[in-house]
Amino acid sequence: MTRRNPYKMTDAGILVLRLGFGIMFIFHGFPKIMGGPDDWSKAGANMHILGIGFFPAFWGFMSALSEFGGGILLMMGLFTRVVAAVMLINMIVAIISHLSGNFSLMPAAHAIEDGIVFAAILIAGPGKYSFDSLMAR
């Protein structure tokens, strides 16, 4: 009698996670990419909380690009750990921004949840159903 491997579907689960979060971040980041320099400056202004007050449009664009472009790469499983790290940093900035001056977790809850997922992807990796896995072969 053969025993069933309880971890057999782990790679499929990671694929579903990557695809789902990738799609959601593409839709979340696209309007930010298309928002232009004024919107990028507003988003990038949050960096002042970390003591970075220069080039807010650049930081806002980088945030939008990490969400939109990161979503595409996450779906593909390409440079997965690097993408997850960048998106995790983006979520940490969002968390700090939401929590600054506000002692309620509710405004930061979504960024915290996303950050947890990106930390898990960073640790678990892309799984075997990914371009990263194909390139490693």
Image (cartoon, rainbow, N blue to C red):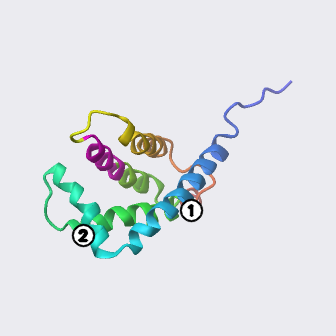
Task: Report the residue marked by disc 2.
Answer: 57
What range is drawn magenta here? 89-99
Task: Report the residue marked by disc 1.
Answer: 76
Left or right of residue 5, residue 56 in this image:
left
**For residue 6, above or below residue 61:** above
Residue at 29% across, 68% down? 40
Query: 10 Å neighbourhood of mark 1: few (<14), some, or many (≥20)?
Result: some
Disc with the residue nearer the chain's start (1 vs 2): 2
Q: Quadrant of the C terminus?
A: bottom right
Residue at 26% across, 47% down? 97
Query: 10 Å neighbourhood of mark 2: few (<14), some, or many (≥20)?
Result: some
Left or right of residue 2, residue 48 in this image:
left
Identified by mark 1, the residue type is Met
**For residue 25, above or below residue 93:** below
Which SS does the magenta portion mostly show? Answer: helix
The percent coordinates of residue 4 (x first, y second) are 77, 30
